[in-house]
């Protein structure tokens, strides 16, 4: 009887240790990002993560997830399969301020010809921000590219609007952080894992 109880306790302990190891996370300024996520039925690994600063304020933590490690922007933009950018808010932000930051990043890193092809998607994307009064500290936004579906934006696990079908649109989003004129150069390096 005592032996049975001891074996059961050991089995429970081993199982608990195994389960806790499965959900590994990376800590970025107190924000936990999973090392792996499932997107479109594919396991993605955290490529790199960092903090978006505006002046001296921390705005959000951003993490880039890919099927395999990439350290150059062309490799990331041309990567096959699903991709994800996770943003975890580090302070409250109005939808206007957040949306303006996104649209500014797209404007600075997308050429005129490419923008004109995706005008309707950009307009719809702007309307998406208008539908959320504000983002609160701790809110989690995911921006996923799922082949055959498109760009899926979710806030706190809830899908926001219909997918955006064009891969060029997703790459325009990625260039907000990874383009020639990123919103935060230090964050770009962190997402490319240049500082590891």
Image (cartoon, rainbow, N blue to C red):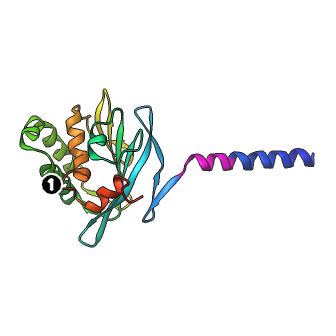
Which residue occupies 30% across, 29% down?
149
Residue 180 % position (x, y)? 19, 53
Crowding at dot 1, Cα within 10 Å, few <14 / some 14-19 / many 20+, comes out as some
- Residue extending furthest toward the right: 1
Is 53 contained in the magenta span?
Answer: no
Which residue occupies 31% across, 42% down?
76
Q: Nearer the viewer, residue 24 or 79?
A: 79
Which residue occupies 73% across, 50% down?
13
- Residue extending furthest toward the top: 148
Residue 132 % position (x, y)? 25, 51
Residue 109 % position (x, y)? 15, 49
Can I make out residue 160 in this image?
A: no
Helix, strand or loop: magenta stretch: helix
Q: Which residues are magenta?
A: 16-24
Q: Quadrant of the N terminus?
A: top right
Check the image and report above or below for 135 versus 10.
below
Which residue occupies 28% across, 36% down?
78
Is 19 contained in the magenta span?
Answer: yes
Tell whether 174 sits left or right of 66: left
Can I make out residue 149 in this image?
A: yes
The residue singled out by tag 1 in the image is 104
């Amino acid at each position: 009887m005592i032996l049975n109880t001891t074996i059961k306790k050991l089995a429970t302990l081993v199982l608990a240790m195994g389960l806790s190891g499965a959900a590994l996370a990376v800590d970025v300024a107190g924000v936990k990002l999973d090392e792996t996520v499932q997107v479109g039925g594919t396991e993605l690994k955290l490529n790199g993560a960092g903090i978006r600063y505006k002046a001296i304020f921390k705005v959000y933590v951003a993490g880039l997830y890919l099927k395999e490690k990439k350290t150059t922007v062309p490799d990331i933009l041309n990567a096959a399969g699903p991709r994800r950018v996770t943003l975890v808010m580090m302070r409250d932000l109005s939808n206007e301020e957040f949306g303006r930051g996104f649209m500014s990043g797209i404007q600075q890193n997308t050429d005129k010809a490419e923008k004109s092809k995706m005008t309707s998607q950009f307009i719809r994307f702007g309307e998406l921000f208008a539908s959320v009064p504000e983002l609160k500290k701790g809110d989690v936004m995911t921006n996923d590219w799922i082949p055959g579906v498109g760009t899926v934006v979710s806030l706190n696990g809830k899908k926001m609007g219909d997918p955006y079908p064009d891969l060029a649109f997703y790459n325009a989003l990625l260039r907000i952080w990874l383009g020639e004129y990123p919103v935060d150069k230090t964050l770009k390096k962190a997402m490319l894992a240049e500082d590891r």
